[in-house]
Image: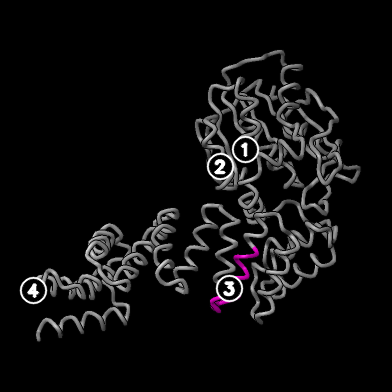
Amino acid sequence: MKMMQKLEKAYDLLRTQAWQEASVVFEAVLALEPHSVLARRGLGTAEMMQEKYASAKLIWSALLQEALEDKAKTESYFALGSIAYQEKNFSLAIQYLLEVCRIYPTDIEATRQIAWAYIEIKEYETALKWCEKLMALSVDKQAVFYNKGVVLMHLSRWSEAIQSFEQVMMGGVNYLNAQLNLAFLSLKLNKISEGIAYYQSVLNISPAHPIAQYQLSALLSEKNCIKAPCEFISTLYDAYAENYDNEMKSQLNYQVPYLFLNVIRDCVGVKKANWVSLDLGCGTGLAAEILKDFSEDIIGVDISEKMLAIAKNKNCYTELWLGDMLSFFDKNERKFDLIYAADSLIYRGDLKPLFEKIQSALESGGLFVFSVEKTNENNFFLQKTGRFSHNKEYVRHVLCASGLTVMACRDLTLRDQGGQAVEGEIWLASKE
């Protein structure tokens, strides 16, 4: 009787989410009755909720081996699948959770975790099928519509993604991320007025939202913006990282790294060097792959964690630094022989603060090579694309004012965008 009272107390503690206290009582029960299935199940749950996954896995694995009935098996499969999901072992989570759905095809929570896990491992077609299954089970449809929209975006099925996010909004709740995605997709389909309306709707909910503010500044051609907010850049490139290399190389005919290579070789007369280099806005490392023959060490700086994860696998860099360019210089004490910024000044209008930091960080005789999109507007101009373009005379003035000497400026096509050539300039400057 005493043991049953302890079990009841332990399960009461579980119901009130007193996980640690529940574990203590379950362990006391197991000291009296080591084989108690009820106590082991309770302890496995309490340990899992405290993120003590190693001990929880041992308990649930043992229970699975002993289970004879479907109900007991699915409980263990579900627990092990949920633990694997929390540990980000999504493929293993899917294996366990598929066993749950094999026995109970209408299990909502297992179906949900399978759908989300397939999204995490980027198997989007399969994820879409599981989103449809989840939809049929009449669960929280807003969350399902939202994730289905995200999957459709990854599959470049823009119009269907819009329909899915619109379904989210029909739920009557101000779902901020759905509106942001609707704004992005509207611009993708060149529906500018709809994009503006969605960004304005975001600001009605969150008046200081940095991404919506910046995008509206670009779309409405406002002239008071001098740089993109960090949140805008990191969000954009985190989402872009997966397909970035393929799109830049295969679809956009990206030429900037090769143009850098040519201008350095033409003006400096070297083909190889043991320089210490800094890659500003390094992204996935496209520029470092081409310019690595100039460098013994390359430091990469970028604001997108997902882009840096890809860059790391290319083995071009001795160090990668996550953060804003100016923040890097505030903490950096090293000097560099070469600093380059390939297609990464497009999110800064006012270049003066950055150029001054670059000049201070260069060795005497060090080189700075960078690209800009060009404009005839005064100084700089925020385009509807959300990218800044720069006036040639403004760039020349800022370089000279920062103590850098212009060695070359070449008007060239940087890449393609929307079927049109993006015209810009490649600049090479040095520190005397």
Residue at coordinates 60% horizontally, 47% vertically from top-left?
A: 303
Observer-nearest of 142 and 410: 142
- Residue under numbered circle 4: 32
Residue at coordinates 58% horizontally, 21% vertically from top-left?
A: 275
Mark 4 vs mark 2, CA separation in Å: 53 Å
Looking at the image, residue 250 lies above or below residue 235: above
- The picture places residue 294, in percent across and down from the top left corner, at 61, 20
264 sits left or right of 417 in the view: left
Observer-nearest of 354 and 44: 44
Q: Which callout, 4 or 1, points at the residue further toward the start of the chain?
A: 4
Position of the C terminus, as image quadrant, is top right
- Residue under numbered circle 3: 135
> What is the three-letter code of the residue carrying label 4?
Leu
Observer-nearest of 103 and 248: 103
Q: Which callout, 3 or 2, points at the residue further toward the start of the chain?
A: 3
**Callout 2: helix, strand or loop?**
helix
Observer-nearest of 97 and 191: 97
Q: Is residue 123 magenta?
A: no
Nearer the observer: mark 4 or 3; the answer is 3
Looking at the image, residue 164 lies above or below residue 363: below
Q: Is residue 141 magenta?
A: yes
- Residue under numbered circle 2: 308
Query: What is the number of the mark on residue 282?
Result: 1
> What is the three-letter code of the residue carrying label 1?
Cys
Range of magenta residues: 135-149
The colour scheme of the drawn protein is one colour
Looking at the image, residue 333 lies above or below residue 180: above
Q: Which callout, 1 or 2, points at the residue further toward the start of the chain?
A: 1
Mark 4 vs mark 1, CA separation in Å: 61 Å
Residue at coordinates 85% horizontally, 57% vertically from top-left?
A: 221
